[in-house]
Image (tube, grey):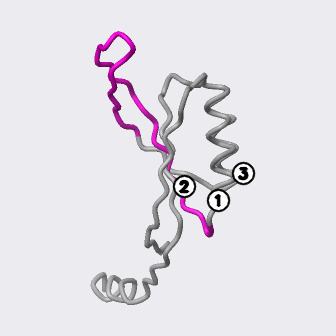
Amino acid sequence: MVKLVAQEVMTALEFQEKPKYIIYLPAGALDMDEIDEFEAGLVEKFGGFTRPTAKGGYKNEAGEVEVETVWVYEIITESDEDAKIGEIAAYIKEKGQQEKVLVEKTTTRCSFI
């Protein structure tokens, strides 16, 4: 029975190419109220997000290595949303006092089953 259901699901998969944006946010850049507002904004603008946690490292102005926790927001959209992503980056720069915000844009093949 399980094998039959798995075969039906596998044959029903239809992968579609969609834009995927990845926004990197240092965990301490925004306070918890701002994080709640930021995440609510992502849901409002895009319908949802995924947030795995990672570590990021860099050399500070003194030449010392710093390692910090980074929240990685992944957003899959139906079409290009560069303008909305730009608004999100501007919010992070302003509220989080960040000089720059790293954003990636790729194309992914995905299917919700």
Q: Nearer the viewer, mark 2 or mark 1?
A: 1
Three-letter code, disc 3: Glu
Q: Nearer the viewer, residue 86 or 32?
A: 86
**How many C-alpha atoms fall within 10 Å of the one at disc 3: few (<14), some, or many (≥20)?**
few
Q: CA distance from mark 3 to mark 1?
A: 13 Å
* Mark identifier at residue 75: 2
Q: Residue at 46%, 36% (x, y): give it.
A: 71
Q: Mark 1: few, some, or many residues within 10 Å (few <14, many ≥20)?
A: some
Residue 26 sits above or below residue 23 on the image: above
Secondary-structure class at tag 2: strand
- Residue 41 falls in which quadrant of the image? top right
For the N terminus, give its image quadrant. bottom left
Label 2 packing within 10 angstroms: few (<14), some (14-19), many (20+): many
Label whose residue precedes the other's in the sequence (3 or 2): 3
Residue 16's place in the image compared with 7, above or below, is: above
Q: Amino acid at mark 1?
A: Glu
Q: CA distance from mark 3 to mark 2?
A: 12 Å
Q: Which mark is residue 44?
A: 3
Left or right: 61 as drawn, with respect to 113: left
Asked if the residue at tag 1 contacts the one at tag 2, i.e. Cβ–Cβ closer than 8 Å, the answer is yes
Between residue 95 and residue 7, name the one nearer to us: 95
Instruction: Say which label, 2 or 1, has the lower sequence index.
Output: 2
Q: Main secondary structure of the magenta part?
A: strand
Q: Residue at x 37, y 17 (%)?
A: 60
- The residue that label 1 is drawn on is 81
**Image: magenta residue range:** 53-79
x, y percentage for residue 45?
70, 53
